[in-house]
Image: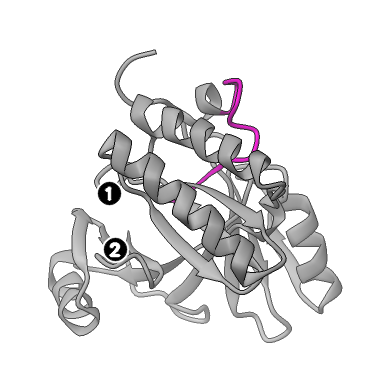
Amino acid sequence: MTGRIRPREFHQLDGVEDWRMLFHATCAHFRTGSFARGVALVAAIGGLADAADHHPHVDLRPDGVTVRLPTPDVDWPSECDVTLARQISQAARELDVPADPAALQHLNVAVDALVIPEVLPFWRALLGYRDKGPEDLIDPHGHGPSLWFQQMDARRTGRNRLHVDVSVPHDQAEARIAAALAAGGRLVTDQNAPTWWVLADAEGNEACVATWLGRD
């Protein structure tokens, strides 16, 4: 196992069962049930990260802790990420804190554009984002959704030119889609499933549910 690890290879590894690959991140959510237990887990993560000199993004909330491993410039994890993921999961087990993959998601806003280089700089400046590639922007602080600029050959009419992509764990996609359909949505197409499904609300505004499957 060398260099960057593709999603299918990652999910076949031992010791990473708590973790899921989403857009731009390898994530886990631990259901602490209290702020104090969350603080204890964050302290343990801090010690592990300092020892490895490899620092994840950690989001502490009253009832849980979400960890995103540091993959700032590529979508796939490194061997250092795998080692730290295993260590964090072990620390959570020692604190009797269970993982909850169903709580994970990453939001991406897709912008249809005829000339991406003319459109992207506006959004970069407006949001204070930075380039991840020629068609992608990310929040350097890790708070907001990423932006992806989709190349259009002709101006789109009759459909929204901005839509939300929701990246969810691969084993949670069907449940998320079923919930959206039960809430009044409709399936536009599943021809690209399980990489992504296109859904729409009652007025035709579209959104995609996406997984890593088919991307590696």
Residue 194 shows which numbered tag? none
Mark 1 — residue? Answer: 72
The percent position of residue 145, horizontal first and vertical second, equals 41, 69
Q: Residues within 10 Å of mark 2 (few under 14, many from 20)?
A: many
C-alpha distance separating marks 2 and 1: 9 Å
Whether the magenta-drawn stretch holds residue 158 is answered as no
In magenta, the rendered stretch is 11-23
**Residue 35: percent from the left, percent from the top?**
61, 71
46, 213: nearer the viewer = 46
Residue located at (51% from left, 70% from top): 164
Q: Dots 2 and 1: beta carbons under 8 Å?
A: yes
Q: Secondary structure at mark 2?
A: strand
What residue appears at the point 48 percent right and 48 percent down from the top-left corner? Answer: 44
Picture residue at 29% right of the left edge, 70% below the top: 113
Decide if residue 78 is in sight here. no
The main secondary structure of the magenta stretch is: loop
